[in-house]
Amino acid sequence: MASVKVCALDDLPVNEAVRVIIDEVPIAVVRDAADAVYAIGDTCTHGDVSLSEGFVEDETLECWAHGSKFSLVTGAALTLPAFEPVPVYEVTMIDGDVYIDPSVVIPY
Ligand code: FES
């Protein structure tokens, strides 16, 4: 599958996560204050919880249920109780629009 246009960069709130589903893959999309955009798997690896309902802080997304923080850069679970990483997806910016390819998982 190729990259899919998700939205315009300006449609994304800063330092908040937005849940999108592309080809049945739930993805948490985050725009930081420097306009970098990250896309990581939206399902916490500790439970069936949507990470996009959590909190963005310093390039991490914190699960609201039990507080595990996931790196927006690598997908790593940085704090317990989660310890398995979430996938990280490729984000491409074209003419101010955000594209994500859910079939391309960036290896870390
Ligand atoms: S469900 Fe996310 S940390 Fe427990």
Image: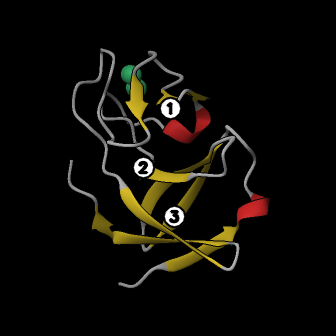
Report the residue marked by disc 3.
Answer: 21
Quadrant of the image containing the N terminus: bottom left
Q: Nearer the viewer, mark 2 or mark 3?
A: 2
Residue 11 as seen in the image, left or right of residue 2: right
Residue 107 as seen in the image, left or right of residue 86: left
**SS state under label 3:** strand
In 3D space, how far apart are the residues under numbered discs 2 and 3 (Cα atoms)? Answer: 11 Å
Amino acid type of the residue that numbered disc 2 sits on in the rendered structure = Ile
Split into quadrants, the picture shows ligand 1 in the one at top left
Circles 2 and 1 in contact, beta carbons < 8 Å? yes
Report the residue marked by disc 2.
Answer: 40
Looking at this view, is 67 or 8 the one in front? 8
Mark linked to residue 61 = 1
Circles 2 and 3 in contact, beta carbons < 8 Å? no
Q: Earlier in the sequence, mark 2 or mark 1?
A: 2
Residue lying at 60% horizontally and 35% vertically, measured from the top left: 53
Residue lying at 58% horizontally and 30% vertically, measured from the top left: 54
In 3D space, how far apart are the residues under numbered discs 2 and 1 (Cα atoms)? Answer: 9 Å
Q: Earlier in the sequence, mark 1 or mark 3?
A: 3
Image coordinates for residue 37, horizontal then vertical, percent = 56, 54
Image coordinates for residue 31, horizontal then vertical, percent = 63, 48
Q: Nearer the viewer, mark 1 or mark 3?
A: 1
**SS state under label 1:** strand
Q: Decide: few, some or many residues near mark 1? Use Cα within 10 Å; few <14, some 14-19, many ≥20.
A: many
Direction right: furthest residue = 10
**SS state under label 2:** strand
In 3D space, how far apart are the residues under numbered discs 1 and 3 (Cα atoms)? Answer: 18 Å
